[in-house]
Amino acid sequence: MTVASKPILLVKSGGEAALPEWRASFAEFAPQLGLEVRGWHDAGVDPLAVEYALVWQPDAGRLAQYPNLKAVISSAAGVDHILADPQLPDVPIVRMVTPETQQRMAEFTVMSSLMLLKDMPRIIGQQARAEWVEFSTPRTALETRVGVLGLGALGLACARMHAQLGFDTAGWARSPRNEPGLACHAGAAQLPAFLARTDILICLLPETDDTRHLIDAALLRQLPRGAAVVNVGRGTHVKSADLLAALDEGHISSAVLDVFDTEPLPADAPFWRHPRIIVTPHAAATPSRRERARQAAVAISAMIGGVPVPHLYDRARGY
């Protein structure tokens, strides 16, 4: 086994073909760190030299094999794919939230809101059937109330872009927030009022015990009849059977779903064929590898320098 002369950053994201890009990006953004970027399946890696890991869905038990591991950096905004490891070592975990992620997520959710506002599910269905049926939609963005569940960095970016387009925008968070120009609701007591004023619900919550299956029949009933749902948070936020029932009953008009309990979404999943659902393949806000390398370099530099690490996962809060 070859012993590396430099600390190793082990990468599991994008496969072996992505390694040259990862190496070039870290060489650009972090030459001072002296890191050697190695691939997840590199058999020549000395476990004692691995100090950092940048990963997406790491194999269970693998991270525990590196006794000198100092931090795990998620290749995505969420960290549930890391927390799923029952042997996960007790080291800092960093979420991948970048300016590019915020821009991409805001663009995606605005696109989703506009598609739902213009009844794109109906248009897609008509095209599939080669039907030319003219119709109009009942309101514009100025008359549409958007509610963003979750006011972290991504949620705030989405809320601000919606407001810039003229949507009547509000947000909800677990704890009180004060954001200029944005009506903020907080806590369980204010959730019903937030839902009652929401025509398009956008979910950007983290995955915690409290948020699992939060979007269920009881919550959906609190939305105005004809409201729509956009889920770009976690697949576990939505109770699938309840959303399908609300769509079939007509209380919920339509939905855009980008995240699912099981990914890739199985071919026999009813979401694929529901006429009022647009399915996207977890494509809302993946930043470029170069941008992710830049953010990872910022996090590692902060750790080495003993300063606060941006977007550090808080185990006590669950996000």
Image: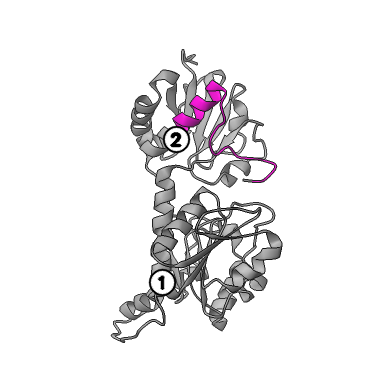
Q: Which residue is mark 1?
A: 141
Does dot 2 land on a helix, a strand or a loop? Answer: helix
Q: Is residue 56 above or below residue 196?
A: above
Mark 2 and mark 1 lie on one chain; the one further toward the N terminus is: 1
- The foreground one among 183 and 74 is 183
Which disc number belongs to residue 232? none
Seen at 58% across and 53% down, the residue is 178
Where is residue 25 drawn, in percent x and y? 36, 31
Left or right: residue 260 compared with residue 297:
right
- The verdict on residue 311 being magenta is yes
Residue 178 in view in this figure: yes
Quadrant in the picture for residue 273: bottom left
Q: Which residues are magenta?
A: 296-318
Q: Residue at x 44, y 35 (%)?
A: 295
Where does residue 245 sit, x and y in percent of width and height? 59, 77
Residue shown at 60%/70% (left/top)? 195
